[in-house]
Image: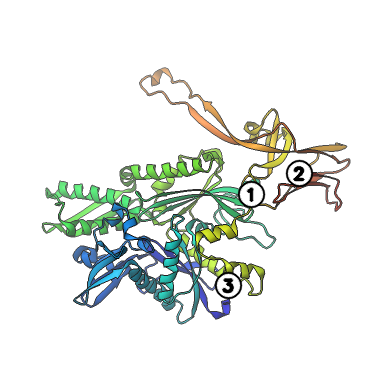
Amino acid sequence: MSQDEGAVIGINLGNTYGSIACINQHGRADVIANENGERQIATRISFNGDQVYTGNEATPQLVRNAHNTIDGFVNLVGRKYSDLQPEELKRKSAQVIDVNDTPSFRVEIDGKETVLSAHDVLVRFIGVLYGAAKDFLSGVPIAGAVLSVPIWWADAQIKALETAAADAGLRVLQVIPVAASALVAYGLTQPGARGELPSHPDGDQGKPYAPEKTLDRNVVVVDFGGSSLDVTVVACRAGLYSVLSYVHDKTIGGRSLDDVLVDYFAKEFTKKSKVTIGEGDARAWAKLRNEAEVTKRSLSASNSAQCSVESLAEGIDFSGNVNRTRFNLLAGNVYQRASANVTEAIQQAKLDACQIDEVLLAGGSARLPGLVDQLSFLFAEDSDTHITGSIDSDQVIARGNAVYAHTIVHVPKEAEERKFIESLANTRRENIDALSVPATARPVGLVLDAPQGADAERVEKQLVDGQLFVPLVYANTPVPARRALRFPVAEGAASTLLRIAEATPEVRVDTIQPEPLDDEDEDDEPLEPEEVKTAYFKPDAQRLAELVVPTSGAKAVTVELIVLSGGQITVEAKVDDAAEVAASAKIGA
């Protein structure tokens, strides 16, 4: 297969919404709109007589035809009914039934009772997405697609997804983790013309990365979807990526935010009309929930939004309004639980929040400003942690998959890289075996004397016994690895001493006491002391090597460090632009 055989697409197959993306004529990934102009297509199918409603068209059917409406089926594929948790069986739509230990649904199609397995429903829905892509591409053949799944999915689910796609007529190029989709969408995996990685978290705009973070960063991917929250901590090392930790929470998601709005508007309706919506009035609750979700989406883009429902209960219409401040208060508990999951993932990775360089947002609910505000509390203002969300969070995954698919088909068929890609299975265990490589356990770098001048204040809190450790190869770096650092030579220095050492990442905590209250402020509550955290490295007292580099008349020294898979380290130092090595050492050889 090559790019000449047709277009490739990326599919985000969420349990609540799905979307499709392709590469446009300008080489950028775009999310495709279906015939109704919708880019986010509800993962929902409804049957009413001889009519079949799919996507967002099926949502109104939850009000008047819920028992024939199927949703929340994606996460059931490839699993046994006996393995499902009770909360996965609870739903306001068609109930999940057990057919030979296969999750299934009983619906009425054209007057006949029909049983559809979760696989059958998924085949139909993938066909909907596939059809929307073919219509958008106006007859251009689709050569294949990249899909993404959460890390918690088992191999049986991934295989079932591939089977469903094949049954829908779609060829699957790769199935990748959602976190990988987010990294690709932001171009963080795409080197430039000279091999350099992006210097800005939001493409070409925004505050640039610190120079020492261009190659090596710790990134947290927060996927806040409709039915769950997934947090992945990733070590990004010069274009190679390793998962350090993963937290999956199926108790919160976009529906949790819908719940708080439904509860709020139900109380508002009762206040205005003196009518209480009965617990058994499924029709009224479905109406209110559908409109509450629309209100939530509006709040992601505006400071206030309205919720209007015709004949909500006992023939009484309802119209209510909520502003973003009120909504953030209502949703505060959900946001705090999301933030707690991010903290847990960081701790599982054996890191501190101040050691995180970037947070990528994905999933439809991640676009809400209240979540960003809550997450920002985890990171100090001066920590240089980027919360990156310049791409609409509900488009990130599909766009990343499209870029990934585009990359695959542009690798020449005869290239070894292409052969390797095509040899990869989509099952997680086989992928782990194929892609796992040795990695460094501890950072290796230079121990320098405390800098003078403008840099002195910037690194003051990172000094240990008057010395600064500058990492060249960070922990969790796949090996073999190569890094280089160029630094100026002190004026008039006949030689320069290079000290190579391993180090331990540490966090320094400084307590800043608040200013005392004035006599006029006696009634005010005293302020709490503030803790300021700073990430630094504590070098080992035992150096790995020390090199004396002749630098008489030189302006700069370039140090190159190579770590091999067996743990051997080679250090070479060159003066100015000279080709010859001025000093070298081999460690562990």
Q: Can you say whether 141 is above or below 87 in the image?
A: below
Q: Closest to the observer: 233 or 88?
A: 88
User: Would you say the residues marked 2 and 1 are in contact, meaning their CB atoms lie under 8 Å apart?
Assistant: no
Mark linked to residue 588: 2
User: Would you say the residues marked 2 and 3 are in contact, meaning their CB atoms lie under 8 Å apart?
Assistant: no
**Amino acid type assigned to the residue bearing label 2 in the image:** Gly
Mark linked to residue 439: 1
Position of residue 199 measured from the top left corner of the image (x, y, whole percent): 62, 53
**SS of the residue at dot 3?**
helix
Position of residue 186 measured from the top left corner of the image (x, y, whole percent): 54, 58
Q: Assess disc 2: are there few (<14), some (14-19) or many (≥20) residues with their C-alpha within 10 Å of its C-alpha.
A: few
Q: CA distance from mark 2 to mark 3?
A: 42 Å
**SS of the residue at dot 1?**
loop
**Amino acid type assigned to the residue bearing label 1 in the image:** Ala
Position of residue 444 measured from the top left corner of the image (x, y, whole percent): 69, 42
Q: Closest to the observer: 500 or 378?
A: 500
Mark linked to residue 409: 3
